[in-house]
């Protein structure tokens, strides 16, 4: 194994980065916003991504999660290529979309019916709208630090909030979110059923839904938390929404609801399903999902939830090909074994170097927090050393390993060679971190 040596930027990459700075608001997009490490992606194959200058990195950013099978999986490429000359978007039901809806209902415990969208933000947005229409109530309770995308209702007190407010007051995480929407959202702490339960009891008459990531970012639910929410929501006829944009198909075929064994009423799915082709899914109980039937327009209780590209045949074809791979015997056991080696190796290397850190998550998606606190909710992450995390990410990049600022996304394409290289990098980066 030869050590990674980053090749200098070629003229074409410099030129493209200059253009990007001129035409794109941030100029860069990737593992870091530091121009020093900016790169222009050229291609991805398996667990590796190449930049225009010919550097090849082991990729744990993985498109921010969708590439459960790795980049350009041959079965997905072949299925998509076969379909391409039939067109893409018809705004009509088509064979791949219908077959995919059936497959999702077979896999996901809460799913009786399915609506297709293009992004995770759309599906969480429509889930909340469905819940409001179904219950006739307006407010949404979301959990502090949970991320549900960029729609106005979701982008409050997410992991980017630096100063949390007192419960249940939300903090808008973007300029441009109307104050009126803030009045419709209540914030409660993840993994604290007493405080969250008391807020639900107090506001149940105005609550349409509780929305959460069952694995919040990389913080697993403590015993009883999901069960407690389920019980309260059932008792008060509040719609329980799981945002499984990350956990869907990643933790299990049936997502976090299968993995943790607590089933919601509605679920948003997105990243794991189609190997990087744009599609998201809102699925759930038939009595709620039926509100999306346009024939209800005359009755006046129809929930409009449609999009130009919803159910496009190419994304649905990619999803069907992906699901065929995920359903193969041993897929999740193998994915989790890879992730477990990486997670354990990272924790071991940090400890051996004397760095105080907690690696949290599940083997298929995890991250280190540079803190001595027990990481159980958003507030317990606020004391983590963010500068050390940035340095960790950059040192890994220098060793030819790309990760998101937060998570490592593990895929089936991370082979033994890539894992060995990563484990060796963890050891040397931990030593470097300890000496700075
Ligand atoms: C848990 C979760 N929900 C929703 C979203 C939003 O998905 P999208 O970026 O496709 O709109 C994300 C994106 O990272 C996410 O992680």
Image (cartoon, grey):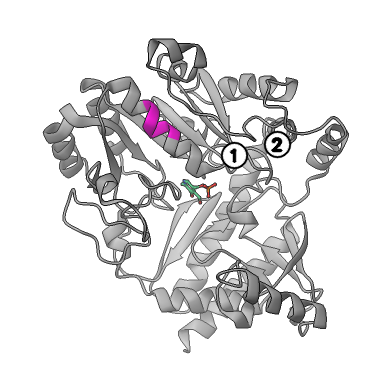
User: In the rendering, which numbered label is found on residue 315?
Assistant: 2
How far across and down, in percent of the image, does residue 161 sit?
A: 32, 62
Q: Quadrant of the N terminus?
A: bottom right
- Residue 220's place in the image compared with 10, above or below, is above
Q: Relative to 338, is 82 on the left or the right?
A: right
Residue at x-position 45% and y-position 31%: 267
Respond yes or no on whether mark 1 lies under 8 Å from ligand 1: yes
The quadrant in which residue 135 appears is top left
- Residue 402's place in the image compared with 14, above or below, is above
Q: Main secondary structure of the magenta part?
A: helix
Q: Is residue 306 magenta?
A: no
Residue marked by disc 1: 118
- Segment colored magenta: 126-130
Residue at x-position 62% and y-position 40%: 333
Crowding at mark 1 (Cα within 10 Å: few <14, some 14-19, many 20+): many
Which secondary structure lies at badge 2? helix
């Amino acid at each position: 194994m030869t050590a990674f040596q980053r090749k200098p930027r070629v003229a074409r990459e410099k030129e493209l980065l200059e253009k990007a700075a001129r035409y794109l608001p941030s100029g860069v997009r990737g593992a870091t916003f530091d121009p020093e490490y900016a790169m222009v992606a050229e291609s991805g194959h398996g667990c590796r991504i190449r930049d225009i200058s010919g550097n090849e990195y082991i990729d744990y950013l993985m498109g921010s999660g969708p590439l459960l099978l790795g980049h350009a999986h041959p079965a997905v490429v072949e299925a998509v290529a076969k379909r391409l000359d039939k067109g893409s978007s018809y705004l009509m039901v088509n064979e791949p979309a219908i077959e995919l809806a059936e497959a999702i209902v077979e896999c996901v415990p809460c799913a009786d019916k399915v609506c297709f969208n293009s992004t995770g933000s759309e599906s969480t947005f429509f889930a909340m709208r469905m819940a409001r229409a179904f219950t006739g109530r307006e407010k949404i309770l979301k959990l502090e630090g949970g991320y549900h995308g960029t729609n106005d209702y979701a982008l409050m007190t997410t992991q980017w909030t630096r100063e949390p407010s007192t419960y249940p007051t939300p903090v808008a995480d973007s300029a441009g979110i109307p104050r009126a929407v803030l009045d419709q959202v209540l914030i409660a702490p993840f993994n604290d059923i007493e405080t969250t339960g008391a807020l639900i009891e107090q506001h149940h008459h105005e609550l349409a839904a509780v929305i959460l990531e069952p694995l919040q970012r990389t913080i697993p639910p403590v015993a009883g938390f999901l069960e407690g929410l389920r019980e309260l929501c059932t008792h008060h006829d509040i719609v329980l929404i799981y945002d499984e944009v990350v956990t869907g198909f990643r933790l299990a075929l049936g997502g976090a609801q299968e993995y943790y064994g607590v089933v919601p009423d509605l679920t948003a799915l997105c990243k794991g399903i189609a190997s990087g082709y744009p599609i998201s899914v809102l699925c759930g109980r038939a009595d709620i999902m039926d509100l999306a039937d346009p024939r209800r327009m005359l009755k006046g209780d129809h929930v409009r939830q449609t999009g130009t590209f919803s159910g496009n045949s190419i994304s649905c074809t990619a999803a069907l090909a992906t699901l065929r791979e995920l359903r193969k015997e041993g897929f999740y056991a193998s994915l989790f074994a890879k992730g477990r080696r990486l997670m354990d190796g990272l924790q071991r290397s940090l400890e051996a170097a004397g760095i105080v850190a907690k690696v949290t998550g599940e083997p298929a998606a995890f991250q280190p927090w540079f803190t001595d606190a027990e990481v159980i909710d958003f507030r317990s992450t606020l004391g983590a050393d963010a500068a050390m995390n940035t340095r960790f990410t950059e040192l890994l990049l220098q060793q030819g390993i790309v990760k998101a600022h937060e998570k490592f996304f593990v895929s089936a394409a991370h082979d033994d060679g890539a894992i060995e290289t990563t484990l060796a990098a963890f050891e040397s980066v931990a030593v470097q971190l300890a000496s700075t």
